[in-house]
Amino acid sequence: MADYRVHEADIRAAGAKLAAISVDSPEKSQGVREELHLTFPILCDTQRKVAREWGVYNAKEKGGIAKPAVFVIDPGRVVRYVSVDEVASRVPTSDIVQLLAAKDGVPAPHRQKVIPGAGTWVRAVRNSLHYGVRQPEAESKQRR
Amino acid sequence: MSSSPRPVREEALQAGETAPDFELPDSTGTPQRLSDLCASNPLVLVFYRGHW
């Protein structure tokens, strides 16, 4: 998320808006927003309704959360780009900025279930150092 | 309209599809509607996992 704070200006410069969404409560989300000094809105999908309808719901983890995913939605709610990551990393924000800057060019390749590159892992490690490591056993604990 | 259930999807929305509209509160309690957020500009919407 801090990555997006850095790139928000680029996204705006490309004529786009930025918003985040999670299943957390407004109180918790506002805590994250203030802690990281985010200026873009964080939407609160506490009922998991949007995650389910958009096909990014992961029922197996932590009582049901959204998979890390990035969508670029054009006017008219048309999906231009989607990236759903199955691991704790996500598509580099610079790729999104590049996509937006490309205007009406060729759509970027669909990057569902990407294998993260080295840069992504560096970011993931850096985020872990910043925000703490997630419990790797969480998923198996949730399994019934 | 809010009472009509929409299908739950196993696979994520694909490029070219129309995203289901929604209205959710943001962290300050302000209602935010997708169709407003992307009314005249592209929207980058980032699903993130809570509990960093």
Image: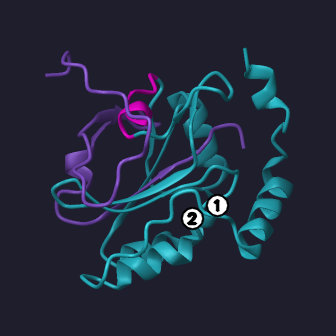
Q: Secondary structure at mark 1?
A: helix
The image quarter in which residue B42 lies: bottom left
How crowded pointer 1 is (Cα within 10 Å; few <14, some 14-19, many 20+) is rated as some
Would residue A113 be found to the left or right of residue A51 on screen? right
> Residue at point 40% right, 76% down?
A108
Please give the label number shown on residue A2. 1
Which colour style is shown? by chain
Q: Amino acid at mark 2?
A: Arg
* Highlighted range, magenta: A47-54
Q: Would you say residue B17 sits in the magenta stretch?
A: no
Q: Residue at x 20, y 15 (%)?
A: B3
* Marks 1 and 2 belong to one chain: yes
For disc 1, the chain is A
Residues at discs 1 and 2 in contact (Cβ within 8 Å):
yes
Magenta segment main secondary structure = helix
**The colour assigned to chain B within the rendered structure:** purple
Q: Image point 79% across, 49% down: which residue?
A: A131
The quarter holding residue A29 reads: top right
Q: Amino acid under label 1?
A: Ala
Question: Residue under circle 2?
Answer: A5
